[in-house]
Amino acid sequence: MSYTTQAQTSMEAAGDGSGSEFLAFTLGREEYGIDILRVQEIRGYEPVTRIANAPDFIKGVVNLRGTIVPIVDMRIKFDLGTPTYDQFTVVIILNIGGRVVGMVVDSVSDVTTLAPEQVKPAPEIGTAFDTDYLIGLGTLDERMLILVDIDKLMSSSEMGLIDRLAA
C-alpha cells in the first residue's frame, strides 16, 4: 500500500505533473513553505494597532487599502522564542477563503516548485507544532522546507480568524 500526502494528492489533481509552487520563508533557523496561490502580497513589517484581549500571537490589525487585516506573528504562534522586528521582518498577506490575514515571518527567501516525489509525509512526533497543519516536508538537494497547510492553520479553532473552510 502506498502512502500519499495531501500535497501529492492535490498536485496529481492538477494533472500536468509539474508540481506545486510554495513561497519559502524562515522562522528562526527553519525554513517553511506555503502554497503560493494563497499569497496576495508581501510587505515590510509596520506597527500594528493592538486589539484588547486578543491572543498573544495576534499582534493586532493594520489598515490595508481600506481593509482591516489581522496580523499573526508566526514566531509566537509556533513558540519560537521572543520575536525581534528588523528590516528583514516581513508580513505575508494571505487570502484564505475570502478573508485577508497577515502573517509575520523573519524573512522570505524564494518561490520553489516541488514535484510530488519531492514531498515526504511529515513524521508523527509529539511537538509543540501540531502535525495536522503540515502537508509534509519538501526536499530540494540539501534544503528541507516544512510545508504548512495554511488554510487549515488559519481556520483552526484556536486561531479563530477565519470561519471553517468547507472540506
Image (cartoon, grey):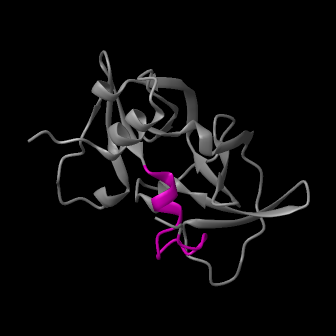
Visible residue check, residue 159 = yes
Q: Residue at x 41, y 57 (%)?
A: 78
Q: From the viewer's perspective, is residue 70 above or below residue 51?
A: above
- In depth, the one of 134 and 32 nearer the eye is 134
Kindly give the residue lying farthest to the top in the view shown. Answer: 141
> Which quadrant would residue 69 be assigned to in this image?
bottom right
Q: Where does the N terminus fall, quadrant-wise?
A: top left
Q: From the viewer's perspective, is residue 11 above or below residue 47?
A: above
Instruction: Answer with left or right where residue 10 lies relative to residue 108.
Output: left
Kindly give the residue lying farthest to the left in the view shown. Answer: 1
Q: Position of residue 7 (x, y in %)?
A: 37, 41
Q: How many marks?
A: 0
Q: Position of residue 22 (x, y in %)?
A: 50, 33
| Residue 167 within the magenta-colored segment of the rendering | no
Q: Which range of residues does the magenta coloring cover?
A: 149-164
Q: Residue at x 59, y 73 (%)?
A: 163
| Residue 152 within the magenta-colored segment of the rendering | yes
Visible residue check, residue 31 = no
Instruction: Answer with left or right where residue 104 lies relative to residue 48.
Output: left
Q: Position of residue 153 (x, y in %)?
A: 47, 60
> Which quadrant would residue 121 be assigned to in this image?
top left
Kindly give the residue lying farthest to the right in the view shown. Answer: 66
Q: Residue at x 61, y 71 (%)?
A: 161
Q: From the viewer's perspective, is residue 77 above or below residue 145?
A: below
